[in-house]
Image: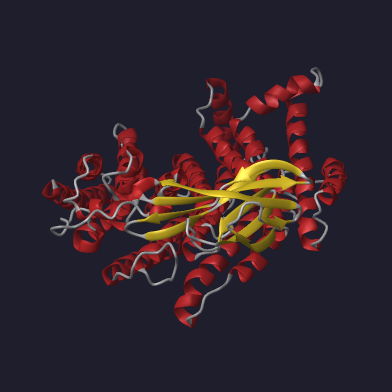
Amino acid sequence: MLELGRYSLWAALAFSMASVLFLALGMRWDREDLLRNGYYAVYAFFLSTVVAGAVLLQAFLKKDFGFGYVAENSAATLSTFYRIAGFWAGQQGSFLLWLLLIAVVAVVIALIDLNKVERLTGGAVMVLCIVGGVFAALMVLNKGSNPFVAAAPGTTPFGLNPLLLHPAMVLHPPALFIGYVGLSVPFAFGISTLLLGRGDKLWVLLSQKWAVAGWLFLSLGIGLGAWWAYVVLSFGGYWGWDPVENTSLVPWLTATALLHAFTLYKSRGLFKHWALGLAAATFFFTILATWTTRTGLIQSVHAFEKNSLLVWILSAFLIATAAASIGLMAWRWRRFASHDQVESVLSRDFLYYLTDLLLALFAVAVAFGTVVVPLTMNRTVGPTTYNAIAQPLGVVMLALLAVCPLLAWRKTEGAELRKTLILPLVTAVLSVPLWLYLGFQSNVWGFVGLVVCGFAVGAVIQFVLRAARRAAGPERSLWAGMGRAFTGSRTRTAAYFVHFGMILVVAGLIGSNVYKHEATALVKVRAGQTASIAGYTLTYKGMTGNTGPQDSTRSIATFAVSRGGRQIGTLAPHTDVYPMSGAAVRAVILGRPFEDLFVVADDPFDSTSTRIALRMVIFPLIRWVWIGSILLCAGAAVSLWPKARRQQQEARVAEGNADNGDAARPPGATA
């Protein structure tokens, strides 16, 4: 089976390059037969990749430890769920997963276009096959990246890394990779439209859904990674500004800006250069994330060991991507001049521009601090610096997000703006007692940020009410229009979810970072011993032991948690000792509506210990981060839901009006 896997990778590389050749010639000579032959090569590329993936998957399911990669990332005692997760737990399998996802996307686009044989689509598939060829070459040329290498005789299965034994980390890598591959589609169509010199919006129409899907899965991946870090890594947080974390955030920022640019490109012919540049930058940053994780040049707790060949291949790919994107944009710059201009700072157009500018600058700043500073200055940028940039910028971005849907296109009259802002200002004022009650007055900037969140809540309500009034018209009640406001446009409904989700995320980030409390205590292993933090009292009850996953030995210390003299729960921090990888402490969390009590032992303990060093952290509003993240993904899913026939007809009319120069507001467009 190892040979079949290796031959499949070689076949995937050969067929991906064959498809590139046919599609390039078909584009150049405008020959449908060559384009169609290129698509047939894509099908073979896809099938070869599926065979390789199936070979590796069956090796994990059948516990075939003759595969070196399986022996490194699985064990006989693992459940089927975690054996499957071993597929992408290491570098070799994650490369194969990425290749498989690229092949899936390429073949889907090729199948959709088989009857039309559109040059633009053929060019996009060609770009995707080039990317797939690079990943196939990584595995074929670099033994350390090939999952089909035999295990050395007598190799003992190591098992899955204990830190990965959590559902969030099982789902986190594939979600990220699906997001990265989805966001490669706008880049592919952007390069294709530049090669053809087509300044119309067809490439946006063909790639926008893929971009939204990529953004959805990247958001999901980042959220799952944060949740995993919070409940598993035991460092007392969910985001540490680690380089690998940063390089997953950067393409999310540019992808968010790209979705805004697409809206203006489609409806008004604005932001054409922005859309092309952001599509290229987003893809570049997804490859930079792989470069950061896989080359080992940047120090990170998540990164793999240094690999010189991967350094050369991935660095060359990054340089080629940047050079091709910049060169093509410079060549076709005039072809993509905008038809219209931003007329006023008091307009939705301008806030779109400002939002995209801030997102892009923040992405570049994080990438620079993560990659350029360590490589050129031999030092790292700490969390304090990132927080100093991210916290005020996040509040400003939220304010823009809140105001943008309330402004008119082109220009907003002063009287109308004042009328529109009344409700958001009222909710901002009404939120003040809540923040004071929760004790958030100790930090001025944090308090200001939370008041802005209150303002944003009112803006979302105003957004909904305006849509309801417009739907109700003069003859029906506001309540009658409310249902239409939520069902009339999936894009607008998605905006409600996404905007409110962002409010919760920002409020949760402010609360859990600016206002968190932390304390440590050394508790004797004796019943009745206590530790306390901010009104909570933890009383030691006893210690038990059992067997955990992968034959680990688990020691569990039980604490009763009380507040105000009343017991409110029980927490049981524990230590797991693994035969192959040693001891790991595990955190436990007592969740409450407005805060979490997080408890972990700073050092491993067992039944022979006489003391337990406890670290206790209170995270206010942390649950809002998780709820908001779910709403972000739900909003993106709503926007991807197929439109009803009536909505499709309305969308076609709106697009036709836009083509004829109609400057009406695009339905559901948001900041």
Residue 150 is left or right of residue 580, and the answer is: left
Which of these two is toward me, 453 or 264?
453
Q: Is residue 101 above or below residue 332?
A: above
Can residue 349 be seen here? The reply is no
Indicate the position of residue 137 as horizontal and vertical percent values: 23, 58
Indicate the position of residue 520 as horizontal and vertical percent values: 65, 63
Can residue 263 be seen here? The reply is yes
Indicate the position of residue 4 as horizontal and vertical percent values: 13, 46
Residue 263 occupies which quadrant of the picture? Answer: top right
Residue at the spot x=22%, y=56% of the render? 156
Quarter of the image where the N terminus is located: top left
Q: Is residue 477 above or below residue 253?
A: above
Residue at the spot x=76%, y=36% of the render? 461
Residue 166 is left or right of residue 443, and the answer is: left
Indicate the position of residue 494 as horizontal and vertical percent values: 61, 36
Which of these two is toward me, 210 or 303?
303
